């Protein structure tokens, strides 16, 4: 989600409520079901990704499968967003809009972000996948580091830690590998709304931000650029791209805070 800040407040669009809503074990089970549906859709789309496929082909595949699985798409209609998926190619960071004019080519990377609602509870996850047989070693590393940084963040999802523990772990791993973390978009709480409090920046320091307590569910979603961290939004009002034209990757999971540690709901 787009970070909540003064600029966002001026647009009079508030994504997240300020109250953190903790979930019962029963609610977390429902969220796991939503998470599993999202994962099934992403797995199906990963298998569809190939040279010559358009991002609209992915959109259509997702729309059909979500319906078959008895869920509803979470993104379509959200603040006017037109599609079920976000498909972001190469220098696009997030919120790329599927199009029959966008054909995947050898060596591209495509981030696929999908959200659903099932039985009143949301699931949200993203992966970035290579297109074709060969991608540049630098891009392979970008995908590996971004996914690994997500797991570094998830490891910090423990009662008594803070949102800052998560962001700090992600940022450290990304920067140690020479890449940068996008600041303008952040992860978020999730539940009966797609975006709930708190915001989960992919940077920060241990001890900063909200304390993690039992029953919180976090959508953790590092967005990592191969160049500088700066982002700008295109004229379509959605697609976020890197300012320097460098490549960008995105991985996302929903994770519950439990007494047993992090519980990944989207796998
Ligand atoms: N996973 C993204 C997010 O949480 C996708 C949102 S797309 C939107 O921000 F259209 F729903 F905004
Ligand atoms: Co999200």
Image (cartoon, grey):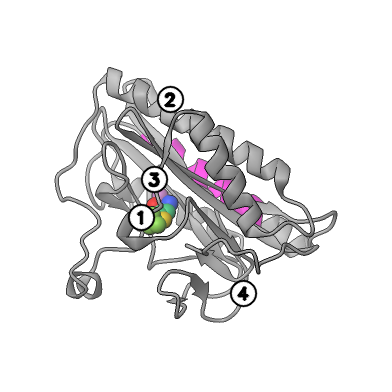
- Label 4: which residue? 246
Mark 2 in CB contact with mark 4 (< 8 angstroms): no
Badge 2 crowding class, 10 Å Cα cut-off, few under 14, some 14 to 19, many 20 or more, is many
The answer to which image quadrant residue 211 occupies is top left
- Per the model, the C-alpha gap separating discs 4 and 3 is 29 Å
Residue at 50% from the left image edge and 31% from the top image edge: 37
Reply above or below: 252 against 110.
Answer: above
- Report if the CB atoms under discs 2 and 3 are less than 8 Å apart: no
Q: Residue at x 39, y 66 (%)?
A: 183
Q: With respect to residue 121, does 45 lie above or below?
A: below
Question: Disc 4 to disc 1, how far (Cα)?
Answer: 30 Å
User: From the viewer's perspective, is the residue at label 2 or at label 3 nearer?
Assistant: 3
Camera-side residue of 231 and 236: 236
Which label is found at residue 77?
1
* Vertical order, 209 against 254 (above or below): below
Q: Dot 1: few (<14), some (14–19), or many (≥20) neighbours within 10 Å?
A: few
* Residue 135 circle label: none
Measured as percent of width and height from the top left, residue 209 is found at: 23, 51
Residue 74 image label: 3
Q: Are marks 3 and 1 in contact (CB under 8 Å)?
A: no
Of labels 2 and 4, earlier in sequence is 2
Residue 118 located left or right of residue 19? right
> According to the image, label 2 marks what residue?
33
- Cα gap from disc 2 to disc 3, whole angstroms: 14 Å
Give the mark, 2 or 3, whose residue is nearer the N terminus: 2
- Residue 215 lies, in percent from the top left, at 26, 28
Q: Nearer the viewer, mark 4 or mark 1?
A: 1
């Amino acid at each position: 989600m787009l970070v909540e800040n003064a600029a966002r407040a001026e647009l009079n669009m508030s994504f997240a409520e300020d109250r953190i809503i903790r979930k019962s074990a029963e609610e977390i089970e429902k969220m796991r079901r939503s998470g599993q549906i999202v994962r099934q859709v992403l797995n199906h789309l990963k298998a569809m990704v190939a040279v010559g496929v358009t991002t609209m082909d992915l959109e259509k595949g997702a729309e059909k499968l979500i319906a078959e699985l008895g869920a509803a798409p979470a993104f379509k209609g959200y603040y006017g967003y037109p599609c079920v998926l976000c498909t972001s190619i190469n220098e696009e960071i997030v919120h790329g809009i599927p199009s029959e004019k966008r054909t995947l080519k050898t060596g591209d990377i495509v981030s696929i972000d999908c959200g659903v609602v099932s039985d009143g509870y949301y699931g949200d996850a993203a992966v970035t996948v290579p297109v074709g047989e060969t991608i540049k070693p630098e891009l392979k590393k970008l995908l590996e580091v971004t996914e690994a940084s997500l797991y570094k963040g998830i490891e910090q999802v423990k009662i008594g830690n803070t949102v800052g523990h998560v962001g700090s772990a992600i940022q450290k791993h990304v920067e140690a590998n020479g890449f940068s973390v996008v600041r303008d978009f952040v992860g978020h709480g999730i539940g009966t709304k797609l975006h709930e409090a708190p915001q989960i920046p992919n940077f920060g320091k241990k001890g900063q931000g909200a304390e993690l307590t039992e029953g919180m569910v976090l959508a953790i979603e590092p967005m990592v650029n191969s160049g500088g961290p700066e982002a700008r939004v295109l004229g379509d009002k959605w697609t976020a791209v890197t300012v320097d034209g460098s490549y960008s990757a995105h991985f996302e999971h929903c994770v519950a805070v439990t007494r047993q540690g992090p519980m990944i709901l989207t796998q």
